[in-house]
Image (tube, rainbow, N blue to C red):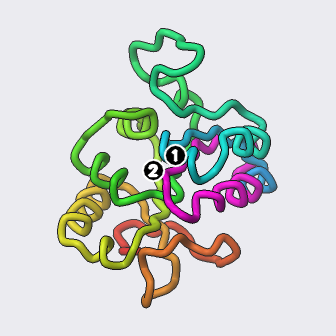
Amino acid sequence: MLQDKTVLLGVCACTPAYKALDLIAMLKRKGADVKTAVTENGTNMVPVAMLERMSGNPVSVEQFGGEYVWDPDKKAWGRNGDVLVIAPCTANMIGKLANGIADDFISTNTLSFPGPKVIGVNMNPMLWQNPAVQRNVAQLKEDGYLFVDNGNPERPSRFPDLDASTAPKRGTST
């Protein structure tokens, strides 16, 4: 199913950010080419060098960092992507995307990506229950984003277990 597909993986700053390494390994075992971006704060949780080593591709952090290549349409990262996954995704990133805020590499590229977008959340349960966060999640679902159901009704805001057989479900809450 993922053979010869390109998965764009965005990694945000939260405790299970290190699990992105396992996610990359799993996607690669299924035949995907994984291109990773990490938020600047996410680099405090999982080293860029580890993400690069695991994916076999350079990792993007800053919109204008490193070797800058003129790309007026902001499509370079997502140009050949088949699906964009943000995992783990924070309340901060959900808020940016729901409100069209493109102020970093991941938010800009996610908002401009025309293909399917999947979110695997991770946040504190009190934050998850906040009405503003729930409003933003509802908006993203209405916009067609898929949220991964972690299968845990007691802790729906916990990052999904990568060994579980959960799948993205349109319009379900996590």
Rounded to the nearest angstrom, the CA distance separating label 1 from label 2 is 5 Å
Which numbered tag is attached to residue 117?
Answer: 2
Give the amino acid type for the residue marked by disc 1 in the picture. Answer: Leu
Contact flag, marks 1 and 2 (Cβ < 8 Å): yes
Residue 110 falls left or right of residue 99:
right
- The span shown in magenta is 1-26
Question: Which quadrant is the C terminus positioned in?
Answer: bottom left
In percent of width and height, residue 57 lies at: 72, 33
Helix, strand or loop for disc 2: strand
The crowd level at tag 1 (other Cα within 10 Å; few <14, some 14-19, many 20+) is: many
Say which quarter of the image contains residue 59.
top right
Question: Which quadrant is the N terminus positioned in?
Answer: bottom right
Say which quarter of the image contains residue 156.
bottom left
Residue 132 falls left or right of residue 105:
left
In percent of width and height, residue 136 lies at: 24, 59
| Rendered position, 21 above or below 109 | below
In magenta stretch: residue 125: no
Residue 136 falls left or right of residue 85:
left
Residue at image mark 1? 84
Of all residues shown, which one is farthest toward the top? 70
